Amino acid sequence: MLKMPYGLLAIVLLALLVAGCAPPGIVERAPEDDPGYLLEQAEQQDPEQAALSRLEAADILARRGQRTQALEIVRDIDDTRLPAEYRLHWAMLTSELGEALEDPWAVIQAGQLLDEAELPRDAALILRGRMGLALAEVEEHRAAAAMLMYVQARTEQEALNDAIWASLSRLDGSELASLREGADELTLGWLELARMVRESDGDIERLFGRLETWRERNPRHPAARNVPSELLALRELRGKEVRHIAVFLPDNGPLSGVAESIRTGMRLHHLHSVERNGGVRLSFLDASHGDLEALYTEARNLGAQVVIGPLDKGQVSELEGRDSVPLPTLALNYGATGSNRTEGLFQYGLSAEDEARQVARRAREDGHRRSALLVPDNEWGARVGRAFEQEWRDRDGDITNAVAYDPQGSATESTRRVLSAGRPDMLFLLALPSYARQVPPTLDYFDAAELPIYATSHLYEGRHQPLLDHDLDDVQFLDIPWQIPDAAVGGEEALPYFDSYRELQEEADPSTFRLMAMGVDAYELARRLPQFQLLPESEMFGATGVLVPGPDGRIERRLPWARFERGVPRPILSFDLLEDGQDDDPLR
């Protein structure tokens, strides 16, 4: 990151005096000025002069080390009231304080000046660098990577490597491809590196062999001279690759059907992966009897390095009660304790509660504040509803009404009740397709057709049925990439593990397809357990979403969003923070 001397006076000297356009006023005032007096004056002044007084007060406070108060003042300034030559002072001070106080939105606020004014080159690069790091903090990784790579192409700063890689490694295939259009040589090098790592699929020997080849082809690239630390850390895994996985799944009992779907996906993907992964061995052990000690003993005797399973919630809860597990383990369910502190235990599943929490986060990011809930009147609906409500309230959202409906009944009365306690500005819907399709027309009947609906994956059967699903038009929902490829990655061929997807999708019933996708990802996650233990912030782009180990070992899924249009799931277009910052003169 380019560094700037602290304080508005230094910024003026460096960025404006060199340009010969430093205005009188701020630089001429004595540093002993009283910020309190300036703020009092601002209350009596016209808006333009008041903005100047507040800006100088903030600068004085910042130089005195009172950064928090300075940021509060500078963020409340209407920068459009400042003379053009002073807006740079405001942007640089705001971004510097935001960076120091870990307030990324303050930096992003300041960075909007890049699209609105001509800036000196050095100041523009500094502001872009700060904004790139801030965008990464708010999970806008595509914009962050593009911004930081642009700065690096003009400064050759290797210090940006880790930040660039952290954002690039969190982009899916379609996002990486979108950065290629019009890209410069440096960006193309980064994209090739990201593609190479993605295609290595966790094979460390293959990865480092390809990395050396890439460095030889790109000797002057910043990442060739100074490999990102996250990639270098993977060297510790050499010789520790997973070559034998034991799978604990029940052959009999109430979970045997679910287990068979997971097993089918795992086996088929294993066959497609033999050449790529160097011959990983799978050993399936029957977990029906419930004796975990015997299962682990058998797995170790077979030479297994990691375990997939168990699936039974009670067995997973039993593992949660231990200090550690005999072998690194990826359980296929979540325990009942609500927290996992067992060393070596990871947990992964297609949790509806996770989806509900993601809905709450998305809806709040979209600006909604008052939500109604429509969930089934059963234990599943209660659990998922609680997850949404807790996340929603944690984000200062209000609940207008929570309606539990009869899944076998009509949606007319339940939808009327949704609106009876005051109009919400969104509706959280948890429903299977047959019920969900009744809700939008019923809202229309009650003059609430414009109420935005956010739903989980459960309302979509996983196949295009426009005649049946046209009543769901404008409903937003999230689902696994394998179910909504056009919305998730821009088409089927861009999906992760496409060969496995194609074969399973041709034969699978939609009701079991998600479970087969779960089996595919369980296989890939198990191969990466040593990597997750070494680098807890690693991510995997899987069939069931972007998979990230949480601090308690629970694998968190980030799912793509879609909106029904003419009965078919389509991508949701979103505002791109970088969209108008990549013209012919990006330093503007």
Image (spheres, rainbow, N blue to C red):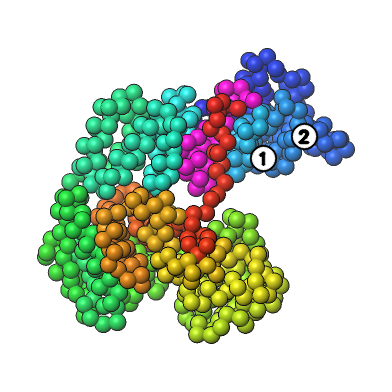
Chief secondary structure of the magenta portion: helix
Between 339 and 470, the one lying in front of the other is 470
Q: Mark 1 points at which residue?
A: 71
Visible residue check, residue 207: yes
User: Residue 420 location, x and y as percent?
Assistant: 69, 77
Mark 2, other Cα within 10 Å: few <14 / some 14–19 / many ≥20? some
- Quadrant housing residue 225: top left
Could you tell me which residue is drawn at 35 percent across and 27 percent down? 221
Q: Mark 2 points at which residue?
A: 81
Left or right: residue 438 compared with residue 494? right
Between 376 and 180, the one lying in front of the other is 180
Kind of residue sitting beneath label 2: Arg
Which quadrant of the rendered structure holds the C terminus? top right
- Quadrant housing residue 479: bottom left
Left or right: residue 496 compared with residue 484? left
User: Residue 299 location, x and y as percent?
Assistant: 16, 66
- Quadrant housing residue 70: top right
Mark 1, other Cα within 10 Å: few <14 / some 14–19 / many ≥20? many
SS under mark 2? helix
User: Residue 407 location, x and y as percent?
Assistant: 50, 82
State the extent of the magenta-drawn residues as a range: 118-147
Could you tell me which residue is drawn at 53 percent across and 60 percent down? 565
- The disc, 2 or 1, on the residue closer to the chain's N-terminal end is 1
Q: Is residue 14 above or below residue 471?
A: above
